[in-house]
Image (cartoon, helix red, strand yellow):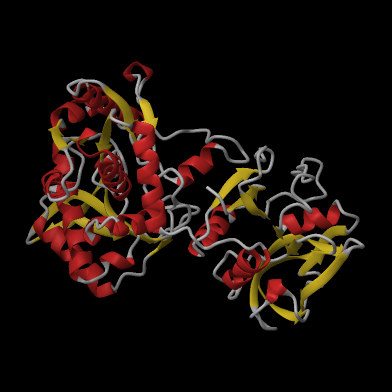
């Protein structure tokens, strides 16, 4: 694929955000750790250097060899990248008197510079750094300043290398998208050809070439990623795709039947397997979150393997892996210390001896939805909130019983249906209910009760990496609480979780 943009990751929390902004411009990009620069750069039109939590003055600061990049490809260095270029090119970087973090405004912009075309003075930018570039390299030209930051942007004479001290990728930088477009389109000459339609055409062609007449098995979850992966594969190989949808007994109320019904109208070859009793039996007596995950993962593998063996001559296992999972596995800090055992269908054992195919592995979540729309998938399915692989097992704190599952399914159904009825569902990124391992005193009629407590959780996010709780209307919460307590036997108290991520996580386990 030509016209790529290479993003070198120095460990910034914003690196994925840079990539998403580039993709929003219909330009394809890939993220690589700074210490794993591709040997073949012929497919790249430009390079972006990310920010970093490191200081360029530290002994362990990232220090890549850019000799194959600088002067050969256009470069945009962001924050740490800008300090890195200055520090190792004869400039001077020193600690700031005060940490420069938050909103600032460009007080001076050099005239007739393509990087700042259509960007006016006083444009708001977002700073996040504790060092400042005190002196530019000799061959550098200052392009912009703020009140507190003299060298907010500069370029290197004799090469298409630009550097900015602020973060154009965050929404707080009001003209950040324009600056990225100026660099990528006007300076680098990159074509804006990365569209959902182009992705579908290219991917279908690649899948047909790779798979040929071989058979593929896919574990459907009912979620967006596995569904879009299934439809893409079906478009490429038709009847040679075999989908298995396993009911682990921990899905939402009536979800097994409703999802199967939705798939029925999509032309997919889907087999539904109800293994509820098998999963509940495997979970009996377990209360530790990781033990529950492992029990669910192992049981899924057993069920999936049994069903896959019913299909003769399967060669490939398809998975709904998306780009954030790929980035995490090759991140600056290496693979995650703990790999969640419920991720996708991941962790299938070697004895299955299947080749893996991941048609969505280079897409972000929002891109998966756009591709799904291009494929004609129903918007209600594409708009579904993310749902954890272990299902309600990690929303029931403590041990799992059929009765606890019943209670939480009823509570969750009332909450989610209420969000739909109040036209709030699409304003929330993810929502669900949690059954707490405590009981509380209540009064119903003239009787004293001692029953379960449930917590409701609703967050807004882009990709789940960070999230904020949603300020749902008090009237909605009041009605939902009353409905739950009146209709769900065994619950006498409802609370609402107002924690953000970080420091809390979206799920409670």
Relative to 113, does residue 36 appear above or below in the rendering? above
Q: Quadrant of the C terminus?
A: top left
| Residue plotted at (85% across, 58% down) | 93
Residue 451 versus residue 36: which sits nearer the camera? 36
* Left or right of 477 on screen, residue 264: left
* Left or right of 74 on screen, residue 437: left
| Residue plotted at (59% across, 68% down) | 181
Tally the marks. 0
Relative to 82, does residue 179 appear above or below in the rendering? below
Which quadrant would residue 303 be assigned to in this image? top left
Q: Could you say where residue 395 lies in the image, as x and y percent from the top left? A: 29, 45
Q: Could you say where residue 291 lies in the image, as x and y percent from the top left? A: 35, 28
Residue 277 versus residue 446: which sits nearer the camera? 277
Q: Could you say where residue 410 lies in the image, as x and y percent from the top left? A: 14, 51
Residue 364 in sight from this viewpoint: yes
Residue 509 in sight from this viewpoint: no
* Left or right of 16 on screen, residue 164: right
Q: Could you say where residue 22 lies in the image, as x and y percent from the top left? A: 55, 60
The residue most toward the left is: 446
Which quadrant would residue 334 be assigned to in this image? top right
Residue 304 versus residue 359: which sits nearer the camera? 359
Relative to 295, does residue 48 appear above or below in the rendering? below
Residue 234 versus residue 324: which sits nearer the camera? 234
Relative to 244, does residue 176 appear above or below in the rendering? below
């Amino acid at each position: 694929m030509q016209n790529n943009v290479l993003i070198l990751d120095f460990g910034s929390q914003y690196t994925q955000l840079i990539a998403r902004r580039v993709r929003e411009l219909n330009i394809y990009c890939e993220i690589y750790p700074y210490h794993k620069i591709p040997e073949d750069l012929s497919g790249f039109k430009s390079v972006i250097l990310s920010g970093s939590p490191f200081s360029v003055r530290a002994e362990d600061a990232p220090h890549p060899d850019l000799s194959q990049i600088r002067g050969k490809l256009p470069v945009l260095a962001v924050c740490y990248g800008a300090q890195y270029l200055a520090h190792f090119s004869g400039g001077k970087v020193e600690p700031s008197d005060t940490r420069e973090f938050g909103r600032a405004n460009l007080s001076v912009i050099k005239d007739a510079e393509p990087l700042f075309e259509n960007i006016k003075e006083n444009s708001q930018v977002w700073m996040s750094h504790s060092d400042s570039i005190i002196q530019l390299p000799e061959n550098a030209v200052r392009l912009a300043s703020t009140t507190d930051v003299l060298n907010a942007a500069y370029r290197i004479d004799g090469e298409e290398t630009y550097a900015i001290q602020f973060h154009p990728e965050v929404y707080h930088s009001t003209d950040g998208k324009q600056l990225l477009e100026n660099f990528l389109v006007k300076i680098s000459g990159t074509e804006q050809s990365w569209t959902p339609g182009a992705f579908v055409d290219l991917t279908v062609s690649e899948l047909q070439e790779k798979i040929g007449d071989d058979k593929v098995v896919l574990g459907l979850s009912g979620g967006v990623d596995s569904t879009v992966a299934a439809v893409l594969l079906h478009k490429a190989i038709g009847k040679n795709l075999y989908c298995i949808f396993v009911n682990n007994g921990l899905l939402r109320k009536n979800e097994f039947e409703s999802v199967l019904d939705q798939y029925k109208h999509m032309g997919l070859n889907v087999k539904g397997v109800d293994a509820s009793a098998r999963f509940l039996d495997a979970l009996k007596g377990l209360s530790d979150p990781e033990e529950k995950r492992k029990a669910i993962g192992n049981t899924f593998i057993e069920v999936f393997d049994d069903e896959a063996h019913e299909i003769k001559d399967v060669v490939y296992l398809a998975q709904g892996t998306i780009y954030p999972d790929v980035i995490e596995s090759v991140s600056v800090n290496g693979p995650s210390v703990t790999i969640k055992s419920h991720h996708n269908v991941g962790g299938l054992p070697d004895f299955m001896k299947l080749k893996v195919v991941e048609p969505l592995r280079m897409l972000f979540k929002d891109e998966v939805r756009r591709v799904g729309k291009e494929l004609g998938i129903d918007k209600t399915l594409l708009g579904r909130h993310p749902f954890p692989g272990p299902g309600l097992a990690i929303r029931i704190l403590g041990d799992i019983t059929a009765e606890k599952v019943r209670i939480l399914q009823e509570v969750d159904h009332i909450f989610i249906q209420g969000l739909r009825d109040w036209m709030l569902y699409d304003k929330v990124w993810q929502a669900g209910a949690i059954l707490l391992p405590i009981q509380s005193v209540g009064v119903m009629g003239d009787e004293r009760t001692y029953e379960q407590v449930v917590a409701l959780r609703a967050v807004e996010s882009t990709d789940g990496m960070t999230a904020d709780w949603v300020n749902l209307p008090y009237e909605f919460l009041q009605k939902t609480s009353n409905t739950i307590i009146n209709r769900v036997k065994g619950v006498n108290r409802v609370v609402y979780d107002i924690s953000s991520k970080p420091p809390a996580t979206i799920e409670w386990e």
